[in-house]
Image (cartoon, rainbow, N blue to C red):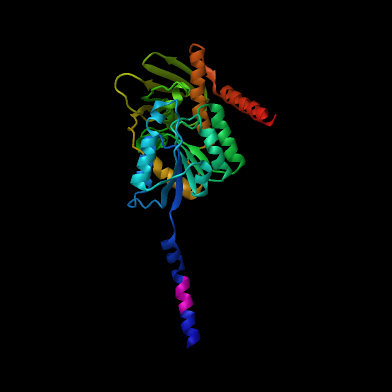
Amino acid sequence: MKRTVLFVALLLAFLTLPFVTKAEAKDLRLGMIGLDTSHVIAFTRLINDPAKKYGCKVVVGYSGGSPDIPSSANRVDKFTEQLRKEFGVEIVDSIEELCRKVDGVLLESVDGRPHLEQVRPVIAAKKPVFIDKPMAGSLADVIEIFRLARDNNVPCWSSSSLRFSPDIISMRNSNEVGMVLGCAAFSPCSLEEHHPDLYWYGVHGVEILFTIMGPGCESARRILTKDNEFVVGIWRDGRIGTYRGIRKGKSDYGALVYGTKSIVQSGRYGGYEPLVVEIIKFFKTGQVPVSVEETTEIFAFMSAADESKSKGGDAVSIAEVIAKAKKDNELRRNRKVN
């Protein structure tokens, strides 16, 4: 009788174990580096919303901030205090300390220039990392970040929130459009003196262009006036994609998509939540939703546009821009060794 009771008790314990484990599972702990952008508030509000049941929670932050960029210096204290008071986020004094307390990291600094140095301790700590736009302040830094992540087997990616707007990302494989033959993307394009021209805000519209066209751009040429940017990309299969950056008049995000079946106006910006959903999936699975190659090409396209500007609008090879950035990284690493 005692053996029967014991057997039944063990059987019940075994059968209920998965449910107990699931009930007791803790949220993934996330940390944010760079509390000088409204994204940290918007993302935390979504991620930490108990009604969403994302299974993740932002728990630690490192303020950072860039004194030579007013939109960073003037907001970092405000957003840091808001994270602490509204969401109970612990603020720490170093990235290394943050990494010891979390399972994953969102690198949010509005300034792309410090991203390489800020991500080094994250990669050293083997923490998966999402890097907000712009991924870095130069193409060489973008490539070096990806190299460090690959060599240390750390999942790492970057994206504008525009990529995952439902009515934009659906254009690449749309029954209504058919095969995409071309795309005319547009977005606001304010400039920031410390970054390549399109990195600061044009990155949103360039991300739209590549989301719809896919990778494979071979060259870029740029025309600009005081209030407008226009960059023409030629893809290896002969397709043409363009980006128009707007600095005067009505500003918006979107694209006109030319397909084998029809010409379609894409939908508009879908907010932050579609990107946050992808970030959550990433931290849970370790799988990046945007390839290294495509993100590298996006920043190479924007760097080629800067070079085209200096050459009076001449076409600039994407492959050559990437090769030069890799060479610059080799020289930089050699200087550190020597």
The question of residue 8 being in magenta is answered with no
Q: Residue at x 59, y 22 (%)?
A: 320
Q: Main secondary structure of the magenta part?
A: helix
Q: At which x and y percent is residue 4? A: 48, 84
Q: Residue at x 38, y 14 (%)?
A: 226
Q: Residue at x 60, y 23 (%)?
A: 324
Q: Residue at x 49, y 29 (%)?
A: 298
User: Is residue 183 depicted above or below 11 in this figure?
Assistant: above
- First to last magenta residue range: 9-14
Q: Is residue 105 visible?
A: yes
Q: At which x and y percent is residue 58? A: 41, 47
Q: Nearer the viewer, residue 270 or 333?
A: 333
Farthest-out residue, bottom: 1
Q: At which x and y percent is residue 177? A: 38, 32
Quarter of the figure that contains the C terminus: top right
Farthest-out residue, top: 312
Q: Is residue 237 visible?
A: no
Position of 73 compared to 301: left or right?
left
Q: Count up the numbered dots.
A: 0
Q: At which x and y percent is residue 62? A: 46, 41
Q: Nearer the viewer, residue 251 or 148?
A: 148
Position of 103 compared to 227: left or right?
right
Farthest-out residue, left: 250
